[in-house]
Image (tube, helix red, strand yellow):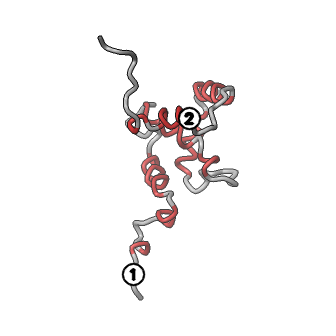
Amino acid sequence: MEKRATDAPSIRPSANTGCSSQWVLNDHLERRSFIVGDRYTIVDMSAWGWLDRAARVMKGKDEPLERWPNLARFMDMMNARPAVDRAHAIMNGHAFKTVMDQDARQAMYPTSFSPVSKGTIS
């Protein structure tokens, strides 16, 4: 029988479904509370921002992180922080723009647009 790369024990089953980064972070957090070092940093804040939206990406899942117990534990710890309640209140009270018009494209991809002149130089 021919061996394939996905048969290797080091490759997780989800590596082919776009979830390999979750496995890497899940494994990294196995014996850690925080992603970098032994205290809360901007890296943890950033990861929370992405992982908090897992339910939007993995539609139909009540517990989108159930396959990654260390990520779920990390999120439980992060969600217990008072700043998370404040962030959710801001997020839930803000009317986000939903139309992808020229202004939105320029805000999302600023390097694709030439600089706007602020006035003329005499």
What residue would you read off at disc 2?
Answer: 78
* 98 or 82: nearer the viewer: 98
x and y percent of residue 23 in the render?
Answer: 47, 55
The quadrant the N terminus occupies is bottom left
Residue sticking out furthest to the left: 122
Q: How many marks?
A: 2
Type of the residue with mark 1? Lys
The quadrant the C terminus occupies is top left
Q: Residue at x 43, y 31 (%)?
A: 42
Classed neighbour count for the residue bearing mark 2: other residues with Cα under 10 Å, few (<14), some (14–19), many (≥20): many
Residue sticking out furthest to the front: 122
Dot 1: element: loop
Q: Residue at x 45, y 31 (%)?
A: 40
What residue would you read off at disc 1?
Answer: 3
Q: Residue at x 59, y 40 (%)?
A: 52
Name which of mark 1 and mark 2 comes first in the sequence: 1
Distance between the alpha carbons at the discs numbered 1 and 2: 41 Å
x and y percent of residue 33 in the render?
Answer: 47, 39
Classed neighbour count for the residue bearing mark 1: other residues with Cα under 10 Å, few (<14), some (14–19), many (≥20): few
Dot 2: element: helix
